[in-house]
Image (tube, rainbow, N blue to C red):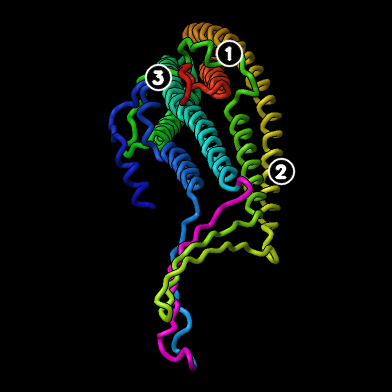
């Protein structure tokens, strides 16, 4: 099993370059272990469905009677040799019920596979966007370091000119060191995000970056437009599981019906030097095994599937309402964050001018710069929240974040 998994993983491309645009990456990820597992589940159900169509095998027997006993059967003169063919016959629609259960199992496996593929597209999009968000945070941290270096240079110049105490330069230097530490942590977060993206895509060599943006592009309205909770892949998969459980329960009830076995053969009578036909029918007696345990287990599976379908319906409805509300709030949050950003930029500009003119202390400049950094982070967080809300709506619609249907 582990060898097969390794072969699947190694069969995928081993990029050492930036990840391709998301739509292309999603297509190239077909060989990822996670999607291969989903395909294997469908293949398993298909195999079981094919096996359900098989009829009982016949049997051939040869046996001899009336030989090597006491007189007059001491020798082989009165031996009777019979060649017999036996064929079981399934009664009561047992085979058709078994076939229906197998086909329902395939339908359920495909529904679960689609649900898994939609979830994979959602997770891959989030991993892709996480790299982009990490890149933005690195840019923010680099700006913080660059501005901190400029502030430190200015503070030292004022100290040398006797217009500022040495303590202010030490404060600016401490603040710069903190900004550099944040920059290093954001770079480590980017490395982790790239590793996760590469693992999800099923590649051995981690990507070095991304070549597409998922946080800002104008997305197809179809991807995150109106969502019908009863058409979500999770609910449809639960319905398919319920139908498959019902078919299995019906098949188990049919199994309780006894089968008959028809027999026909040829008997050789050595004493009379004659040949005769023999025929018969056998019917098992239902004295001990009534298949009650399997029927009870199948009924319990059906009850559980019905409960899961009911829960899936409620959950789908709640998820749609929540996702719609979050998407609307995220759009408003992005607009507010951009306004906050503009205000913070102007505040920092004025604080720097005032500090250079000696009209305000260093502490006000540092506060203004921290406010600008926080505003940049708010903008990045708002874009990430908007993306996540839209990605969730797209997933509920059975689509990738790009608006392409997942199949």
Kindly state the secondary structure of the residue where label 3 is placed. helix
What residue sits right under mark 1 in the picture? 225
Picture quarter containing residue 331? Answer: top right
- x, y (%) of residue 341? 54, 11
Distance from the alpha carbon under mark 3 to that under mark 2: 63 Å
Label 1 crowding class (10 Å Cα cut-off): few <14, some 14-19, many 20+?
Answer: few
Which numbered circle lies on residue 146? Answer: 3
Q: Residue at x 69, y 66 (%)?
A: 288
- x, y (%) of residue 76? 40, 85
Label 3 crowding class (10 Å Cα cut-off): few <14, some 14-19, many 20+?
Answer: some
Q: Tell which of 294 and 338 is nearer to you.
A: 294
Question: Image height check: is 79 above or below 373?
Answer: below
- x, y (%) of residue 303? 71, 43
Q: How many marks?
A: 3
Instruction: Tell me if residue 238 can be seen.
Output: yes
Report whether 179 appears left or right of 334. left
Which numbered circle lies on residue 329? Answer: none
Nearer the camera: disc 1 or disc 2: 2
Q: Which of marks 3 and 1 precedes in the sequence?
A: 3
Residue 90 magenta-drawn? yes
Kindly state the secondary structure of the residue where label 2 is placed. helix
What residue sits right under mark 2 in the picture? 303
What's drawn in magenta, residue-wise? 71-93
- x, y (%) of residue 261? 55, 59
């Amino acid at each position: 099993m582990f060898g097969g998994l390794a072969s699947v993983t190694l069969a995928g491309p081993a990029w050492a370059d930036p990840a391709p645009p998301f739509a292309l990456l999603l297509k190239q990820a077909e060989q990822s272990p996670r999607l291969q597992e989903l395909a294997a589940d469908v293949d398993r159900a298909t195999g079981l469905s094919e096996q359900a169509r098989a009829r009982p095998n016949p049997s051939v027997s040869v046996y001899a009677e009336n030989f090597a006993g006491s007189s007059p059967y001491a020798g082989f003169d009165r031996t009777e040799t019979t060649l017999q063919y036996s064929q079981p016959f399934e009664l009561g629609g047992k085979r058709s019920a078994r076939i229906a259960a197998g086909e329902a199992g395939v339908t359920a496996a495909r529904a679960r596979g689609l649900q898994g593929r939609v979830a994979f597209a959602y997770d891959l999009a989030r991993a892709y966007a996480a790299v982009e968000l990490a890149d933005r945070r690195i840019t923010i941290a680099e700006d913080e370091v660059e501005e901190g270096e400029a502030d430190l240079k200015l503070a030292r110049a004022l100290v040398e000119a006797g217009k500022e105490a040495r303590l202010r330069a030490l404060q600016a230097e401490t603040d710069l060191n903190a900004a550099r530490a944040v920059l290093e942590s954001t770079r480590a977060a980017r490395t982790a995000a790239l590793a996760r993206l590469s693992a999800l895509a099923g590649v051995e060599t981690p990507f070095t970056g991304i070549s597409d943006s998922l946080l800002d592009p104008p997305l197809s309205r179809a991807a995150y437009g109106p969502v019908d909770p009863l058409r979500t892949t999770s609910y449809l998969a639960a319905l398919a599981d319920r139908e498959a459980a019902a078919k299995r329960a019906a098949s188990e009830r049919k199994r309780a019906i006894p089968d008959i076995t028809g027999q026909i053969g040829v008997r050789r009578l050595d004493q009379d030097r004659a040949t005769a036909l023999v025929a018969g029918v056998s019917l098992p007696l239902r004295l001990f095994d009534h298949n009650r345990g399997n029927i009870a287990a199948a009924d319990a599976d059906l009850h559980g599937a019905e409960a899961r379908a009911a829960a899936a319906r409620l959950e789908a409805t709640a998820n749609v309402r929540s996702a719609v509300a979050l998407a609307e709030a995220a759009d408003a949050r992005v607009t507010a964050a951009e306004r906050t950003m503009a205000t913070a930029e102007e505040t920092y500009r004025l604080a720097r001018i005032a500090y250079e003119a000696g009209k305000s202390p260093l502490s006000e400049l540092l506060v203004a710069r921290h406010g600008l950094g926080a505003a940049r982070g708010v903008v990045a967080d708002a874009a990430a929240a908007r993306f996540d809300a839209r990605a969730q709506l797209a997933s509920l619609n059975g689509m990738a974040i790009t608006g392409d249907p997942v199949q």
